[in-house]
Image (cartoon, rainbow, N blue to C red):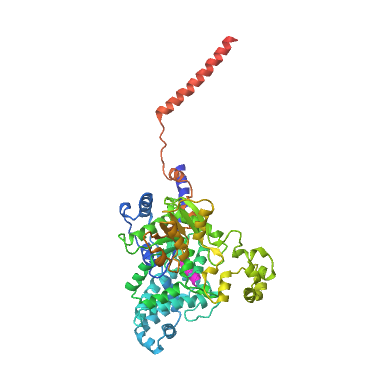
Amino acid sequence: MNIKDDVSSALDNVFKESKDFIIIGLTGRTGSGCSTCAKLLNGEKLPLPSPLDSHFRGNEARKYKIIKKYIDKTWRKFEWLQVRCVLSRFVLELNFSAFCQLVANVVSLDIKDVRSKLGRFRDSYKSYHEQLNHFLSMGEVEKRSSAYKIYFEVLPQFTEELRGSLNDLSNSAYTTLYQKVGDNVRSSGRADKAEFDPDNVFIFPSIINKVIKAVRYRAKQNGTPCYIVIDAIRNPYEAVYLKERYANFFLISVNTTNENRLRHLRESHKFNFQQIECLDEKEYPEKLSGHNKFISQNIQKCIETADIHINNPREDNFESSELAGQLAWYVSLMMHPGLIMPTSVENCMQIAFSVKKSSGCISRQVGAVVTDEFYSVKSVGWNNTAQGQVPCLLRSAEDLINGADKIAYSDYEKNDREFRNKVEDKYLAVLDEIGKDGRNPSFCFKDIQNEIEGEKNQVHTRSLHAEENAFLQISKYGGQKVKGGFLFTTASPCELCAKKASQLGIAKIYFIDPYPGIATTHILKSGDNQPVLELFRGAVGSAFHRLYQPKMPYKDELEMAYTIKKQTNKKKSKIKQLEFEISKLKMELETLRATRTD
């Protein structure tokens, strides 16, 4: 092997880890398109349009051209791990009688009716139940070899048969059952028990982790790369669990407009208004407390922690090819970081994502960026207290009670007896316990004041919202033109900030997660100069750096990978040679003259 071959092999090894093992987790509300994305990733080939027919324009189309050329040569299908099949594994641990009792309890039907309507499924259920028990009785080495067949063949077949049988009860029985099973498993480790056991908080993602290891073992045995897509991450702690274990795990949020989502649920799932309302309450809970934070679905938090956001337009001229184009973009970068540069939209949202870390809010951190129409940044902001006031994260209920750090608290907090009584009732009994763990007993003024008044009033918040903070920075440090410009926010504007955006003449608002109010439909969708609302597409946070940071300069990469001859200009070389010879002759001439003079 020559030196060039050695260098090429070394270069291959540099990219080997990125290309050999990728895990993608998908998150998003039901009806957003997670299953569609998983199906695309599971295909033998991505249905990509030509650069001329794609939705990309300008330099983004040139980037897409590079992406398409790369992915067409390197594509390998992902193994599709369906989360519902992992739930089915816990369902099948129950015998048929216990399963029928679980269904009856969840869908509120008489057990006799359930047994009767599921009777034709009994023999099939028992057969699958025996297969699972046999698998669970195996040793770890044997399990690792058999897991692929169980999770990618047996359980998908069972789940489809089960769905058909449950449809005999109602068109929502399957969804309702599996939502409840998911909560139960996260809570107790069993499909039929809801009692919370903290030791089982991570039992569900730990099973997913075992399946990942089994798939990777199979890939190594076959000498092939291992690509896995997990289709429905619905609890943020499941994502955290996998992120902490795999450097090549990426959580992708699949988003669509609420109008598209609702239409899809009505037309494809045949859900009525009440069923959709129950689904939304389950996936997007208004407020979770205690152990429910660990066991419940919380799509909003999953979207907040996502590494990549893609947009499913559903209704457009490109059909699923637009989704496929976005998936190709990021899978290519997972395999080959730095293949292209980020978009202007990604650059601006990354700034917003970064500055939100400066927020001292203990409920939710939000970042915002205001630019002109050319994406030139004019200001940044994050949700935080007004200048000179102390953020909630740095304040302490203990200090307030004991009269320490007085400047950090308002006259109202220090002197209002009802407020102080409420703080003492909430925190005095637990201050010692909190102190033992080294945690700071921060508190939210808004929550306490609302408890006193028995209301839910946003006016009581001490913080400015990220968007209004960004707007105010412009006037505070010298006005700059923002009319016709863009607003980037890691959430989306509330009613108050939406009005300010309209007043400033913001032309477009890029956002990640819709605000659960009427800001969009009532404020922004009103009048003659309505800002364009656009769901953000792109990578943020650490993923932004992992995907767009080249492993080495691209010029060096090409020179190492291929024998690219360096062409020299012969005429230029000849001139340089003659100039060198002339300089030598001049020196010799000077030496001779000096000798003759002597």
Q: Look at the picture and state if 284 lies above or below 588.
A: below
**Where does residue 8 sit, x and y in percent of width and height?**
45, 46
Q: Which residue appears farthest toward the bottom when viewing the image?
A: 112
In this picture, residue 406 sits left or right of residue 474 = right
Instruction: Examine the structure image and report whether residue 269 is included in the region drawn in magenta.
Output: no
Rendered-image quadrant of the N terminus: top left
Return the x and y of residue 353 as percentages of the image width and height: 50, 58
Badge count = 0
At horizontal 65% and vertical 74% (from top left) the residue drawn is 417
Query: In front here: 157 or 51?
Result: 51
Residue 418 point in image, percent of width and height = 63, 75
Q: Does the rendering let one see residue 368?
A: yes
Could you say where residue 589 lies in the image, as x and y percent from the top left? 52, 15
- Residue 327: name its quadrant: bottom left
- Tell me which secondary structure the magenta stretch mostly adopts: helix
**Which of the two residues, 435 or 247, is positioned nearer the viewer here?**
435
Please give the range of residues in magenta.
Answer: 204-212
In this rendering, the answer to whether 382 lies above or below 263 is above
Residue 62 is left or right of residue 547, and the answer is left
In the rendered view of the protein, which quadrant contains the C terminus? top right
Q: Residue at x 45, y 26 (%)?
A: 576
Q: Is residue 6 above or below residue 517?
A: above
For the question of whether residue 2 can be seen, the reply is no
Pick out the residue farthest to the top: 597
